[in-house]
Image (cartoon, coloured by chain):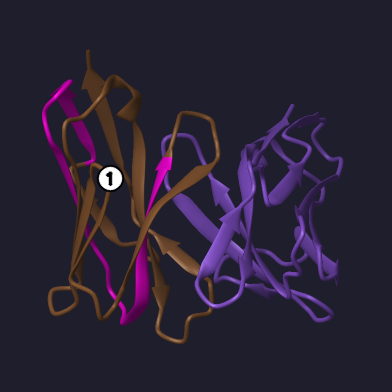
């Protein structure tokens, strides 16, 4: 399969709780990116982490990367109803072609 | 505002006809653009890499004669779905690379074939 794996496939939490999504991939990468997609809409870029980085923060987002395990996690803290969306990881393989391979995605529902 | 624009955002066409989707980079030149397809409740699947001034590179399993890609200028790539059938109904989205690490996505185009 071209795509990596993400888990969970679906996640439902209460507002204020934290949400953690995991992503695994198969090839060596230059960087890994996380995107959000609201239903029926385009992609919103959230954060990029390079292969030589282990952790990155942006506001309420925290991303980790473990290249030895070929995995990444996205943590959203203090979730809000507006965070309800699908979240995808995408890898840019070594060689930095710009060609992104997307994970299967996690659908997050944050209940008010 | 958007740095990559797609048009049309929604299109309905009859089975057997062809439909063209445009992807434009605004305010920057993109020698490489990418086309993805996304079926409902699924992830994005890379279809092809669009190369300015040369032939597109298609991913395995994507029919190049059905999905014609033209990248005639540094700011425009087009995807033409030829002889469209209902199973081609999908969300098509493009991306353009600016510099080394920056990739911008278009807003996507919904295609419905009836």
Percent x, y of residue B68? 79, 62
Residue at the limit of the structure toward the top, as seen here: A112
> Bounds of the magenta span?
A9-36
Q: Is residue B39 placed above or below A26 in the rendered structure? A: above
**Residue in front for this viewpoint, B81 or B2:** B2
Position of B43 with respect to B4 (left or right) is left
**Residue in front for this viewpoint, B80 or B27:** B27
Give the quarter of the image for residue A72: bottom left
Q: Secondary structure at mark 1?
A: loop
Chain coloured purple in the rendered structure: B
Q: In percent of the image, x 42 and y 35: which residue is there?
A: B41
Q: For residue A84, say whether it is visible.
A: no
Position of A41 with respect to B110 (left or right) is left
**Residue in front for this viewpoint, B93 or B31:** B31
Percent x, y of residue A86? 36, 37
Q: Which residue position is annotated with label 1?
A: A59
Give the quarter of the image for residue A24: bottom left
Q: In percent of the image, x 54 and y 33: which residue is there?
A: A41
Percent x, y of residue A48? 37, 63
- Chain A's colour is brown
- Does the stretch in magenta take in A18? yes
Q: For residue B17, say whether it is visible.
A: yes
Q: Is residue A18 placed above or below A64 in the rendered structure? A: above
Quarter of the rendering occupied by the N terminus of chain A: bottom left
């Amino acid at each position: 399969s071209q795509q990596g794996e993400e888990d969970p496939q679906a996640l439902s939490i209460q507002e204020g709780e934290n949400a953690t999504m995991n992503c695994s991939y198969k090839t060596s990468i230059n960087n890994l990116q996380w995107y959000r997609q609201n239903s029926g809409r385009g992609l919103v870029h959230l954060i990029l982490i390079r292969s030589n980085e282990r952790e990155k923060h942006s506001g309420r987002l925290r991303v980790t990367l473990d290249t030895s395990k070929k995995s990444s996690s996205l943590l959203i803290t203090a979730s809000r109803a507006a965070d309800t969306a699908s979240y995808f990881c995408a890898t840019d393989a070594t060689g930095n072609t710009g060609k992104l391979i997307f994970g299967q995605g996690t659908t997050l529902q944050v209940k008010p | 505002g958007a740095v990559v624009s797609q048009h049309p955002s929604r299109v309905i066409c009859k089975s057997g006809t062809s439909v063209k989707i445009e992807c434009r980079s605004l305010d920057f030149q993109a020698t490489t653009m990418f086309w993805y397809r996304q079926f409902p409740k699924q992830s994005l699947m890379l279809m092809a890499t669009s190369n300015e001034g040369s032939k597109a590179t298609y991913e395995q399993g994507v029919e190049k004669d059905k999905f014609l890609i033209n990248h005639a200028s540094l700011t425009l790539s087009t995807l033409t779905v030829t002889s469209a059938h209902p199973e081609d109904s999908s969300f098509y989205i493009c991306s353009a690379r600016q510099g080394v690490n920056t990739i911008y996505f278009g807003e996507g185009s919904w295609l419905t074939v009836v």
